[in-house]
Image (cartoon, rainbow, N blue to C red):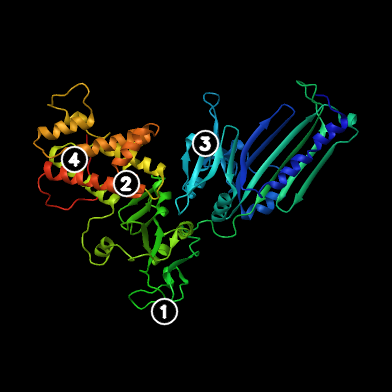
Amino acid sequence: MSTTPVQELEFLCQADFLKELQRIGTEAWLVANSSSDDGRSNSHFFSALIPNALIKSSLERTDWDLGRMDTGPCWWTGYKDGKEVSGYSRLHHDNGIEPLVIWRVFHGMRDGYTEVCEEFRLFHNLYHDGQNRRFLKFNDAGNEEAIIEYDGARTRIKLHALREFAAAKECHVAAFFESVRWGRYTLEGMGCQEERRESREDLTSYGFVLCDAEMVLDKEKKSLSRIMGKKLIPPATTKAHRSRHADDSHYPEFIIGQNESGELVRFTCDDEKLANYFGKNPEAPHYLTPVFFRREVLQKYYSNPAKYSVEDAYLRCGSLWGLRLDNDHPRHVTVFLGDLGRDLPAPERDYWKSFNIPPDGPGISDVNWKRGFMCEFTDPTHPELKFKSAFEHFQRRHQEQFNWTLFKALEPGDEHFLTTLRVPLTDDQAEFDAQVLALTKVLIDSINEKQVERGLTLAAQDRGITKLEKYLNSVGVTDIAQYIKFLRSLQELRSVSVAHRKGKSFAKIAVEFGMDKKDRITVFEEILASAVAFMEFLHKTLLPPDKHSPPSKPTSAE
């Protein structure tokens, strides 16, 4: 495309690039490494850490303090007092300037690539998500944040993470830049003269050159301009090493009761401001004041089993944090007021607050009372907890007795069907369908057919439930009709409710489960109660008397 001399001069003056430089250090991301070339212009960005003591001397120069190829260790040779000396350095220089991005080249034998310096990655304990070309940081609430993103031509890093790192190392972040452009006219043809100048303002220093070019291999390039320099970004104002609970000064108030006028009473969850059994803050509510929440508060955690685990009386986020809770209530979840402040990270407290309701019924369940205050071993009574306990106990005992489990362990991609199995948190068909699917995965699809069919005479059409029935008969178990009927009805419910479009068949099985008269929450509670009865029946008829209380986790084997 042809251009006029005026347009060419405007292009070479690079006002647009200078405007882009003003944004460096003001946006969420810093381009730590980048290269581009469209034939008429090329630009390069690079980055390093410059010790605070060298800032003044660095800004006196407009060139880069560190080259891209100076980011690795080297052997060196020199002279001292007229004698040759040699040594080894971690970097090509010993002035304390360190690269943020390291260039790796392999002399054409393999493709080169870049990597962010190891110390930065370890400082923030970053996880490499190679599939998505990024590095992740997990905060105290377990939420992930992309800190580094990269592709073949560019690496960018979250600025706040860089500034925290720089604060710890007592350095400034140096953003190096270079932009070269070629023009189609000589300076004379554009009516201008050669220009060379340097600019220094605050923490920015760069040089600008505009001159004629003599490109032997490209006669179209008759002039060029070049901007080269650096912009230094100061470290965070506080030390970079921050506590996991750095923002724990945020303690919202939760509803803990109602006064005589019917007004809601709220109080902070800051455990330092609550009373205890040793005389602390006697006028304040007690640390063990129960706080009520809608059961839907657990939906977030059930929906992400890779991160969270909802267990009997406990919620955990990996090894980051855990919360004692009373989830044996039929319709609510309660947590002690002090635990909300002590054990939950600040972002989670606000989440829980959105589900907070006035007290409704007993503050804690009988199970929680016996465990926490009477020090008694007590099995859970809530249907989902009771089923998981009974199922895992039976699996463990069966493995010990026969060296195989009646129900195969779920594959890694299916483990969530058991860990997130629950009474639906709402009267929602989609959630109900998901829980029906989960229970059938655990009880029917996981029947260990290879083990139970050994020694049996089977018809070609016999499948899992029929094989289980014949196996139980073969080992002398009787009175199993009601349990086999329950399994077949459950399988039918899954088939017409989840696997296929709902129609007349669903309406028929819905009546069998009482869905024409009861809400889905109640129906699934009853389904789980039947599943628990089935587990207890198998335990009683297949296994010897249990002389020991069950451990927390079973041992599974096919």
Q: In the structure shown, which secondary structural element does the residue marked by tag 2 occupy? A: helix
Tell me where residue 449 appears, x and y as whole percent.
Answer: 21, 30
| Number of numbered discs overlaid on the protein picture | 4
Between residue 424 and residue 213, name the one nearer to us: 424
**Disc 2: which residue:** 524
Q: Residues under labels 2 and 3: Cα distance? A: 43 Å
Residue 452: percent from the left, percent from the top?
Answer: 17, 31
Sooner in the amino-acid sequence: mark 1 or mark 2: 1
The residue shown at (13%, 37%) is 402
Residue 315 coordinates in the image, percent (x, y): 36, 54
Relative horizontal placement of residue 426, taking residue 163 as reference (left or right): left
The reply to whether callout 1 and callout 2 are in contact (CB within 8 Å) is no
Q: Which mark is residue 437?
A: none
Q: CA distance from mark 1 to mark 2?
A: 44 Å
How crowded pointer 3 is (Cα within 10 Å; few <14, some 14-19, many 20+) is rated as some
Residue 133, numbered label? 3
Residue for point 67% across, 46% down: 24
Select label 2 or label 3 by which is in front: 2
Residue type at mark 4: give it: Gln
Q: Is 460 located above or below residue 316 in the figure? A: above
Instruction: Report which residue position mark 1 lands on.
Output: 283
Asked whether disc 2 touches disc 3, contact meaning CB atoms under 8 Å apart, the reply is no
Q: Nearer the viewer, residue 162 or 462?
A: 462
The amino acid type, in three-letter code, at marker 1 is Glu
Secondary element at image label 1: loop
